[in-house]
Amino acid sequence: RSKEESAPYVVVVHGPPKVGKSLLIKCLVKHYTHNTPTDITNPITIIADGQRRIQFVECPNNVNGMIDAAKYADAVIFLIDSSYEFEVETFEFLDLLKVHGMPEVMAVLTYLDCFKDAGKLKNEKEDFTDNFKTQVSETAEVFCLSRLDHG
């Protein structure tokens, strides 16, 4: 393949229902393309910086879909509902990623605006970050999102 036709960089977005996967993908598409997408079909491929193709894929929450995604992912974004933290599917997908060659992995904590106590929120972030890095890698990144606007 020529440079223009090289395979896209595949970013798999994983998380339970209603955690914000589609919204995050819409926001990333808007960031890279400067256009607000009206309808997202899975997968969606964009051109970033006029040259690099990036494909965003929403990972299905079933074993077969997770196995497939583990095979082709170049990077994985785990969306984690801060009120539940890790769910069984998160651990299952992490195990599959380890088997198929661990890609770049990061976590995004959502629903942080549900915490009213700033001290409890700070402790939650620290505990989650420590736990995630223990499960994945000391170099894994953890980000926090709240009040994400899709407009």
Image (cartoon, rainbow, N blue to C red):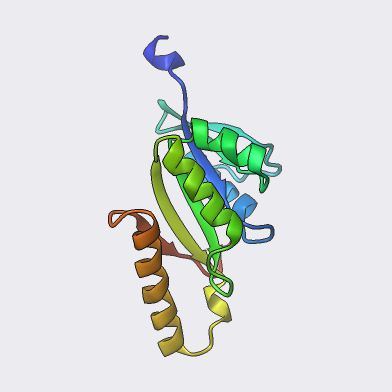
| Numbered disc total | 0
User: Which residue occupies 54% across, 58% down?
Assistant: 79
Residue 151 seen anywhere in this rendered image of the structure: no
Residue 132 seen anywhere in this rendered image of the structure: yes
Q: Does 144 sit above or below residue 51? A: below
- Left or right: residue 53 compared with residue 17: left
Q: Nearer the viewer, residue 101 or 107?
A: 101
Q: Does 120 sit above or below residue 1? A: below
User: Which residue occupies 39% across, 58% down?
Assistant: 135
Image spot of residue 123 (x, y percent): 39, 82
User: Which residue occupies 58% across, 75% down?
Assistant: 83
- Left or right: residue 19 compared with residue 78: right
Image spot of residue 86 (x, y percent): 53, 64
Quadrant occupied by the N terminus: top left
Of all residues shown, which one is farthest toward the top? 1
Quadrant occupied by the C terminus: bottom right
Q: Nearer the viewer, residue 5 or 17?
A: 17
User: Which residue occupies 37% across, 15% down?
Assistant: 3
- Residue 129 lies in what quarter of the image? bottom left
Image spot of residue 62 (x, y percent): 68, 45
Image spot of residue 136 (x, y percent): 38, 54
